[in-house]
Amino acid sequence: MTDRADVAGDTGGTGTGVTDVAALAGALRKAVRGEVGFDVTARALVTMDASNYRRVPLGVVAPRDADDVAAVLEVCRERGVPVVARGGGTSIAGQATGTGVVLDFTRHMTALVELDPGSRTAVVQPGLVLDRLQEAAAPHGLRFGPDPSTHSRCTLGGMIGNNSCGSHSVAWGTTADSVRELSVITARGRRLRLGQGWAGAPDGLRELAEGELARLRTGFPDLPRRISGYALDALLPEKGADVARSFCGSEGTLGILTEAVVRLVDSPRARALAVLAYADESAAAEAAAGLLPLGPLTVEGMAADLVPAGAGLPTGGAWLFVETGGETAAEARARAEEIVRAADVVDSLVVTDPAAQRSLWRIREDAAGTATRMPDGTEAWPGWEDCAVPPARLGGYLREFRALLAAHQLRGTPYGHFGDGCIHVRVDFDLLTEAGVGRFRRFSEELADLVVAHGGSLSGEHGDGQARAELLPRMYGADMVGLFERAKAVWDPDDLLNPGMLVRPARLDENLRFSVLPRRPVDVAFAYPADGGDFRAAVRRCVGVAKCRTTTVSGPAVMCPSFRATGEEEHSTRGRARLLHEMLAGDLVTDGWRSPEVLGALDLCLSCKGCRSDCPAGVDMATYKAEFLHHHYADRRRPAAHHSMGRLPEWLRWASRARLAPLLNTLAATRPLAGLGKHLAGIAPERDIPRLAPRTFTGWWRKRKAATPGAGGSPAGGAGDHPAPMPTPTSNAGDLVVLWPDTFTEHLAPSVGQAAVRVLEAAGLRVALPPTLLPRKGAIGDGGTRSAAALLTARRARVCCGLTYVSTGQLDRARTVLRRTLDLMEPVLRAGVPVVVLEPSCAAALRTDLPELLPDDPRAARLSAAVLTFAETLERHAPHWTPPAVDRPVAGQTHCHQHAVLGDAPDRRLRAAAGLTGELSGGCCGLAGNFGFEKGHFEVSRACAEDRLLPSVRQASEDTVILADGFSCRTQLDQLAGVRGRHLAEVLAEALDRADGER
């Protein structure tokens, strides 16, 4: 038998001290029906939770039922291997990590076993996500009371383990207040059913409690958010000797939860939100306690530091979000207005529209991620995330807390549950250097003393874990902590369950996840301007809040389509970030940029860029993927798809010059030849190859100009034109705009470009195409060259955004293409002419990838700033133009890059002006450029489309306009649904033609 110390002695290590890991894995595979993962990927995904800590497990088991859990405990007990239960992995104190075997309950034990509206109870398994319970309870007018901000991905098991609370705790209390009975298995295999009246108590627990009644009655602070330590006071006879309640908040150290009976509460039929503005956070904190007698559902506070510009909040420096409920909207609003009258506010706002309320709550819920960056971009970290003091003392506590931060030259932005006296804060600790870690420890010790001095709890919501357990003697004293240790021994005498948490804890400055990262920056291709050019800092952005693990999304949200399609952590933004972190660490993922594990995780990343906007911490996995592919395939053979689709602009230009479109279309329509071609090109056999247009967009442009002399402006070297001086934007009638002939519009969908020209000119704008003549030496200069020498030596070239090269990680080639593009576009940039880009993915590449790949070329930033979408162009440069009336409903999808990078507010306004009603869905179409065409991606691509896009189209009425500005989106609709999607420009051009025909 392996000695347990060999497994857990080094809690930050890899666990390689176990002499026979293979035997352990084999025994587990024989004993359980669920998955057993001892591979690098399975272990890397759970090395961290949402805390500052990292522990590498031996393996991961996803049990299918309670019998599997019992079998794992038996195998691990025989070998002295620790076991850690893990739900959504959003804990911020380190308690969801471990060095032995991690139990992942999110794969199989996710059932809502029963919901009984009559008794207002539900029976749940530990891996059930809270939102799934809420959805099931809602039709009965019920809900589960506690609702942490991670409600879309946190599990009931994790909530019970941490005694989670959430914003509605002033009305409905903590998770412990909502627990009736718990089914648990102890480390020694006993199956217990915990409840009141000592039900399910393990041998010795009652004797322990009854021998310490005086201490249990006097040793715990009386406040609504006391989560720290074990809740042994729940065992008092006057509290019903509630073993289930005492188990809540034990962080997986006493037993493994397999099922729970929870209490539900009535959900108000209507709600209103009073947003109360105050001068600063202390004023808001002092006001919060005074609102509690009015019976609010929430009293949440946050300061201006965490509120994005244009959030629509009343004027102030800090706000309270006070929610009220009622049987009717009028009743809820009346209660909100009563709270406004009772509050001494600078300004206020009462919101009754449910969509507007959700939008405001999203600001609050995303704070755990947005708070990871200070306003100047400095990193900030958890560790003192959720201390709680009596609500009446919160204002004074916050002032002293601010003073303590200043004394240690630290910064933080408090926010959270002001009505319960519970404060969240991320602090800009330096956890990368020895001196910084030392300051972290000193600050933690002094803050613990400050919290205790105010009669508070070190943890008010998220548990102690490793972050605070070491300091529990300062809160409870040595005798009470000794009692905690005795209670742990009653439940788990072998100390196998989550050792190092709560009792006999690891030091709060050990096992820090940053300590394993390289000391020097790694060489990278992108500039990472938001992270100081440091790829390590970019990867550190993922703090584990796991919004990417949300299984259902609403509104315009995109992130993370591959996780929703697969349900696998490996294919979430967080999972990929974890593998990149381990790649940089190098002790678990040892192959660096060559790692097959990281490649496997990134393979199903659609590069939708959804995380760039939807991740509260601003993780940009599309860029990280391109960076990784760039290094992974350096001096190595690339997949065929990288050549066939990554270099698509080259192949299509070649086919156009050779006039091969008809031949290639014929070959693509011939099954045997198409099948062979797809096989050689790495294209999924399920896909149809899109047809090439018989005439390119620029070919149409030349013919049109020849037939209509003077049509459109002409930049120097414009398509099909001799060099000529670049006109100024204000010369002649109407502004001049340059229309970007992207690869998709040029070769595959020229009708989109033609429609855009029709609309832009109808709006009074003059349209030109980018230059196509490039001197052999140097850039074009001012575009005024007319000399014969220049004409003879210049060569024809095309602008390109580099998108396909970036998405396949061919970054050296991308930079070459982009430099050539900047040379071509120099006269346009000198003249300050706006550049209209019709394809959202190309516009996004020019806005973000271009300046981040060529940060030292000032022209890159200028072109990035010049790029406008179709709708932005009309709004800015034809503000008085009225679009034609279409007056039809719309369906379809906002392009994922449009949502993440460009924004769609101008598009919404343009649609409204044209009488196009309804909302487009969010998500990603699943084709995502080359992704959905690559061999092996078809099923995931289709699943992504089935998430939101295809259902929205199927539900549309016959007269609905199907909008899809992206070529990939239109192709996906055509190939999977037989539906023709159209660019907004096409819809407006058709309406213009119809209006002209009616005159």
Image (cartoon, rainbow, N blue to C red):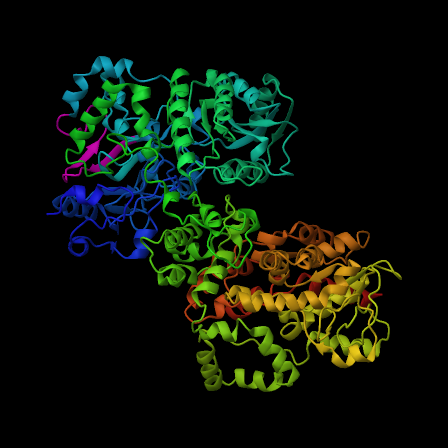
Is any part of residue 225 visible from this angle? no
Q: Which of 320 and 23 is in front in this view?
A: 23
Left or right, 778 with respect to 546, comes to right
Image quarter (top left, top right, bottom left or bottom right) of the C terminus: bottom right
Q: What residue is rendered at 27% in x and 22% in y? A: 234
Q: In which quarter of the image is residue 188?
A: top left
Residue 585 place in picture, x, y as percent: 37, 51
Can residue 786 be seen here?
Answer: yes
Left or right? Give the position of 432 relative to 20. right
560 w.r.t. 340: above or below: below
Q: Position of residue 243 (x, y in %)?
A: 23, 27
Q: What residue is at 52 percent from the left and 72 percent from the top?
A: 645
Q: Is residue 793 located in the magenta-colored stretch of the structure?
A: no
Is 169 placed left or right of 973 in the picture? Answer: left
Residue 390 position, x and y percent, is 43, 18
Task: Look at the image and give the residue range highlighted in magenta.
Answer: 180-204
Q: Which residue lies furthest to the left in this view?
A: 1
